[in-house]
Amino acid sequence: DSGDIQINQQDISQVSQHSLRTHIGIVPQDTVLFNDTLFNNVQYGCPTASKDEVLKAIELAHLSEFIASLPDGLATMVGERGLKLSGGEKQRVAIARTILKNPQILVFDEATSSLDSHSEQAILTAINEVAKNRTSLVIAHRLSTIVDSDNIIVMSHGEIVEQGNHQQLLALQGQYSKMWQLQQS
């Protein structure tokens, strides 16, 4: 009933909160954007980043095509809380910010929960790009978001009830399999 949380065999209770935060990038379910330009909203992930670094992050987050379609491009004002952007566009801004930060650990909190199928595919492609060679924690109710994960932990009422990759969990024919079948119909 007790334990510790370790990152690379180091107990996080022995690390300062500031140090821990510098190594973690979070893509939240509801991205906070500022009433500023797209460029500045992406650069917020690393305020000292060069324009080239911001452009590379935008490309990796699959935002380039969208930005190119805007009359003001990177200088486009996003509106209060990103009002002028769709859910998928806001998520890609959050992913670009996280890419720019270049953390060792990524946390995606329901990153595709409010998106249509087309936007979800673009976000999943971006997430897979960003997650290469990094530790990633993906919190999701939409199981299509996590099918490529190395390890999926199924929780119910705060308890771990199943664990494995997508194929292993389907073979168990337990809770994950039932949820998968419901979401596929």
Image (spheres, grey):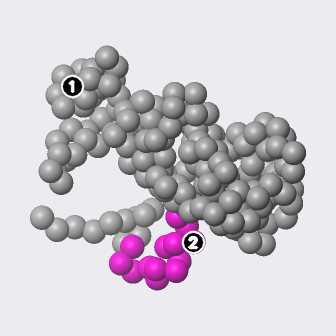
Q: Which residue is mark 2?
A: 22
Q: Which residue is mark 1?
A: 178
Q: Is residue 122 magenta?
A: no
Please tell me how crowded label 2 is: few (under 14), some (14-19), or many (20+) other residues with Cα within 10 Å.
few
Please tell me how crowded label 1 is: few (under 14), some (14-19), or many (20+) other residues with Cα within 10 Å.
few
Q: Position of residue 144 (x, y in %)?
A: 42, 30
Left/right of residue 54 with respect to residue 5 in the rendered view: right
Displayed quadrant of residue 176 = top left
Front-lying residue, 7 or 87 = 87
Q: Which residues are magenta?
A: 12-25
For residue 28, which numbered disc appears in the image?
none
Displayed quadrant of residue 39 = bottom right
Residue 125 in view of the camera:
no
Q: Quadrant of the N terminus?
A: bottom left
Q: Position of residue 141 (x, y in %)?
A: 34, 40
Q: Number of callouts in the render? A: 2
Q: Is residue 21 magenta?
A: yes
Predominant secondary structure in magenta?
helix
Q: Amino acid at mark 1?
A: Lys
Left/right of residue 133 with respect to residue 146 in the rendered view: right
Q: Position of residue 135 (x, y in %)?
A: 49, 52
The residue positioned 35% from the left and 28% from the top of the image is 166
- Above or below residue 163? Residue 184 is above
| Label 2 SS | helix
- Above or below residue 17? Residue 93 is above
